[in-house]
Image (spheres, rainbow, N blue to C red):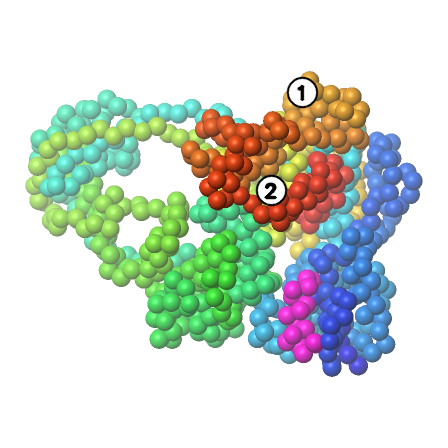
Amino acid sequence: MKSLVIAEKPSVGRDIARVLGCRQGGNGYLEGKDYVVTWALGHLVELADPESYGEQWKEWKMETLPMLPEHLEIQVIKKTGHQYQTVKKQMYRKDIGQIIIATDAGREGELVARWIIKKSGVRKPMKRLWISSVTDKAIREGFSKLRDAREYQKLFEAAVARAEADWMVGLNATRALTVKHNAQLSCGRVQTPTLAIIAKREAQIKAFQPKEYYGLKIKGENVFWTWKSSQNSNSTFRREDVERVLEHAANSTAVVEEVKKKQQKSYAPQLYDLTSLQQDANRMFGFSAKQTLDFMQNLYERHKVVTYPRTDSRYLTADIVETIPERLRACRNGAYAQICGKLLKSAIKANKSFVDDKKVSDHHAIIPTEQGVDWKNLEYGERKIYELVVSRFLAVLLPPCEYQQTEVSAVCQGERFSLKGRVLRQPGWQEIKTIQKEAGFSEDSEEEDEFENGDMGIPDFFKGQKILFTDGKITQGRTKPPAPFTEATLLAAMENPVKYMDTTDKKLKQTLGETGGLGTVATRADIIEKLLHSFMIEKREQYIHLTSKGRQILDLAPQGLTSPELTAKWEQELADIASGKAGKKDFESRIRKYTTDIVKDIQASSKTYRHDNLTNKKCPQCGKLMLEVNHKNGRMLVCQDRACGCRKTLSRITNARCPRCHKKMELVGEGENRKFICACGYREKLSAFEKRRKDSGGGVSKKDVSQYMNKMKREAKEPVNNAFADALSKLKL
């Protein structure tokens, strides 16, 4: 008898098939002597649409809400139905004795395979492959240690509970809001609290009152000393205090009061989980969270040079330590070859700073695999992300940075002054930062030099030494409000939203911190993309801002859905289901009651929704006034009637660069009147641009033009902020 292996994606399935010797090709599967390998295409089965339960839910009507079927059914996704039939056919083969689940090792991966098996109705023994990377070695080791699938039954139940809860709450709230206000509105337990976090930051910025502050630098022994206030601060809000100190201290003698010299160590940052990697990639290269995840998926699935990307752990398990030398050999072809070689010459020293079994849940931190790659074969984004993973991996293996820190304090005319400096003794892991700077990596703002004199030493001083203070200068600054969110800082806020919670329940805050915040490492990028796509948030340069629509949704949505507390409660209960401490039925009962309550709240609300982006242009299909919306690719007109869905492109952000400032230009207008416009004021007709490109030897190929036009046609058919499509898409919250 043969075993059927079900992978989550074709690329992973083919890798497993190759390792298992399955070379006979089929339509959607590969076969060998002992194994048949097939795959999903992500999810092949999903929760059924509301209209599949009866005529009453085909139309969006308030009187048919809430939608709470007695049992939630699952259905085959039409778009990938052909692959589902392929997998089902293999499962029912008489020569298949057991099924091996080889989908991603986690809650959602478990759901992908189990729903396929459940929908097909097949009943055969099941095993589970649980691996963190898809290298040949990891696959072979995983198949030598297959586990009984029954060990993961509770994990599957938790995944189903999460999916069903999001279906009931998200679809009912979205449909109720949309029908109530006849506008394309949606909300959910993750996206709406994310809006609330952005709103809270914007309120802090708006309420902020800047204040001028002052400090004093005064010269003595060819170095500048910093004045310390009575509160031991470097500044004060009272300019007259600084002026008084300068008047008394200038051209006066100071006496050294204390000299402290300490040998200090600076340790490398922790290994990457997905969120911290997305943050650094956004800060250093401007990559969006979704782009970083896509690059990581390519590195994991296609190139096989990094471990499982969707992890929330920043530690390794002890069994990984023995594989570190092989991983070092695999990544020594690039800029870090010399460091890899140095590390390989001595024994690897693991410590609790990066190896701790207790701090690893489903998957360990992201590190390079044992499989090497020619860095030149990686695309720009893939190479940059791989460099980040490799550099952080090497950093934790290198010794700490060691330096001598000197602090000197002196007194002059009753006022205290200080001086700090440091001398580097051993660079340790800081060698990595040197290489990164040479490679053009931007400096991480959170790790800026905290010492006034940088890595420079300072003169030797001794207690009681007299120093003549000469000229001084008053420094001045202004307090700044919190910065608007970027994708990097918003990801951090979603991961740890405790300070944005209004509750005083310490246990609930602790739960939210322990369960990973809003969303998961795998879904946060999609949540941000969804909010951008549905015009609830927008980007101005790198900063994220709420739109009028986003603010109004926060006001219209039921209060419970605007707080991270709901996610905290859910995740705690889901964790209890996965561990066997709680039952799925009790959780489902509470969700049904909560869904009924929020629908009643929306129905009873007297609040209204107002379009503030209404134009005077009428829809060519229904005659109603159209809305002007900004999306990530430009601007367009959209009919305000959600049932119509008509839209018209006004402008698109192109890849054409302005000849003056080299920024991307916007293409506006229609037909022969189309022209490029740049933010710097440059304008150029499309015909003139094409001629200039042709004369300079540039231009695009017919293939590029064809691909671009096909993309335009696809986008023209996609719904723009269709509430139902938004609600159903990417329900993995």
Q: Quadrant of the N terminus?
A: bottom right
Residue under circle 2? 528
Q: SS of the residue at dot 2?
A: helix
Residue under circle 1? 615
Q: Residues within 10 Å of mark 2 (few under 14, many from 20)?
A: many
Say if 226 sits above or below 670 in the image: below
Compared across the picture, whether 709 is left or right of 160 comes to left
Decide whether residue 18 is among the magenta residues: yes
Q: Residue furthest front?
A: 695
Residue 352, position as x, y percentages in the image: 44, 65
**Number of numbered discs visible in the structure rendering:** 2
Say if 389 sits above or below 705 in the image: below
**Label 2, label 1: how far apart the Cα atoms are:** 27 Å
Q: Which is more foreground, mark 2 or mark 1?
A: 1
- Which residues make up the magenta segment? 8-23
Residue 378, position as x, y percentages in the image: 50, 60
On the question of residue 517 being in view, the answer is no
